[in-house]
Image (cartoon, rainbow, N blue to C red):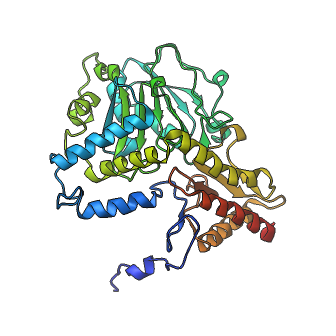
């Protein structure tokens, strides 16, 4: 019997031979859908603060969540978050645990009585999961279901059918797996026209702070941090104060029993410290908010993201070799999905081309572009911190690959 051994560190480390435009030597273009790339200056600041933050003699990952240093970290993170998105005072900013997936049950648990109905706009894999979890707490009406069209677009208002009196409407503004986004032609946010007075709740995990946003259009926004605003480990929740006073009931009409840690009102009262919070991920969110402000805010983020996506979409629009998944009016600025599909090639041949594309792209310094296991193909995720030079490099690679294999 042989004993399994862990791979050596050397076998897991890529040679530091790359010197790619827009990056420090040895670093790759990280197209990962999340966790995603971070600005190098943010990483370098974190390196310093892990060792010794604010001259305290203690690193950020060692500090107590009740220490004055962390008080300052948390206060600045919230204040800068409010500056980034111009968040009004009647909204609470929370940093929670459990990922955005936990919001799938926290939202209906806190905001939906068993006798009520909530409407869900099912535009992708994660929107499907949100609706699925919510069914445990009340009636769920799918006001739009994109499964029949393979989630290739986000619906127009005329295609949405709301229930008579929804408790709230839930949407996902960017669909990471399918590469679709609720957007206007100029890339700005397009929102569904929900019934008057009904709170709109938005899962913004993959496009949070990538473009200007009017927070007052929403009852609640939530986002896992690991794509645009930090690292895995915390979830940003922006919730209007009136929603904190909702008292949902169970199937017997009695007040629903909700664990304290899962109550938005408790987390708001305790300033995201009902239990020991994820100190380092919240600190990283704070650094990212400062970085966004330093770059020029959400207008700058939007302009850059439009420019980056254009490099790649221009190739798709001029090619018969590649086929994008999303309909043109719903193409994401964050997750660009496509596959090799030259005329006359069957599915097996196209899949072989996809694999060849991914292998050669990796060798050229472009990492983590394999499509999600449910869709296959190729996915380039170009979040806020992703350098423009990487998008240009991918576009050039796509053209060259088509010449060689078309």
Q: Residue 31, image x and y in percent?
A: 55, 59
Quarter of image, res 83: top left
Q: Residue 50, image x and y in percent?
A: 27, 62
Q: Residue 349, image x and y in percent?
A: 74, 65
Residue that appears at 28% across and 60% down? 49
Residue that appears at 27% across and 35% down? 262
In this picture, is 67 found above or below 388? above
Quarter of image, res 109: top left
Question: Going by the image, does 11 lie left or right of 321?
Answer: left
Quarter of image, res 92: top left
Q: Quadrant of the C terminus?
A: bottom right
Q: Can see residue 96?
A: no
Question: Going by the image, does 31 lie left or right of 251?
Answer: right
Q: Residue 102, image x and y in percent?
A: 36, 40
Residue that appears at 63% across and 45% down? 306
- Towards the viewer: 84 or 1: 84
- Towards the viewer: 166 or 185: 185
Question: Going by the image, does 22 lie left or right of 264?
Answer: right
Question: Residue pushed farthest right?
Answer: 344
- Towards the viewer: 37 or 173: 37
């Amino acid at each position: 019997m042989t004993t399994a051994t862990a791979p050596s560190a050397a076998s897991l480390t890529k040679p530091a031979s790359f010197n790619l435009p827009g990056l420090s030597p040895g670093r790759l273009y990280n197209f990962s859908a999340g966790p995603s790339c971070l600005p190098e200056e943010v990483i370098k600041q974190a390196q310093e603060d892990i060792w010794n933050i604010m001259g305290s003699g203690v690193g950020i990952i060692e500090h107590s969540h009740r220490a004055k240093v962390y008080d300052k970290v948390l206060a600045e993170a919230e204040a800068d978050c409010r500056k980034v998105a111009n968040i009004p005072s009647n909204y609470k900013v929370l940093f929670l645990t459990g990922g955005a997936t936990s919001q799938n049950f926290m939202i209906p648990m806190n905001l939906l009585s068993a006798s009520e109905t909530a409407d869900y706009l099912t535009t992708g894999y994660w929107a499907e999961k949100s609706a699925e979890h919510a069914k445990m707490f009340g009636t769920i009406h799918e006001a739009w279901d994109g499964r029949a069209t393979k989630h290739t677009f986000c619906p127009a208002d005329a295609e949405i059918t709301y229930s008579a009196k929804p408790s709230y409407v839930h949407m996902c503004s960017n669909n990471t797996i399918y590469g679709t986004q609720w957007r206007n032609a100029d890339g700005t946010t397009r929102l569904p026209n929900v019934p008057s007075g009904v709170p709109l709740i938005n899962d913004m995990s993959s496009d949070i702070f990538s473009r200007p946003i009017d927070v007052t259009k929403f009852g609640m926004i939530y986002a896992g941090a690991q794509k645009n605003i930090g690292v895995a480990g915390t979830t940003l929740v922006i919730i209007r104060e009136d929603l904190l006073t909702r008292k949902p009931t169970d199937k017997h009409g009695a007040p629903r029993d909700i664990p304290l840690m899962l109550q938005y009102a408790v987390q708001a009262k305790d300033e995201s410290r009902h239990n020991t919070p994820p100190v380092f991920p919240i600190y990283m969110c704070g650094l990212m908010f400062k970085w966004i402000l330093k770059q020029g805010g959400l207008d700058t983020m939007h302009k850059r993201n439009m420019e980056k996506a254009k490099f790649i979409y221009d190739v798709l629009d001029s090619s018969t070799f590649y086929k994008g998944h999303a309909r043109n009016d719903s193409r994401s600025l964050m997750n660009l999905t496509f596959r090799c599909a030259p005329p006359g090639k069957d599915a097996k041949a196209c899949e072989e081309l996809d694999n060849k594309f991914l292998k050669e792209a990796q060798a050229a310094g472009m990492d983590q572009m394999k499509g999600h296991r449910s869709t296959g193909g190729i996915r380039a995720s170009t979040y806020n911190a992703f350098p423009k030079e990487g998008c240009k490099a991918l576009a050039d690679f796509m053209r060259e690959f088509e010449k060689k294999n078309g």
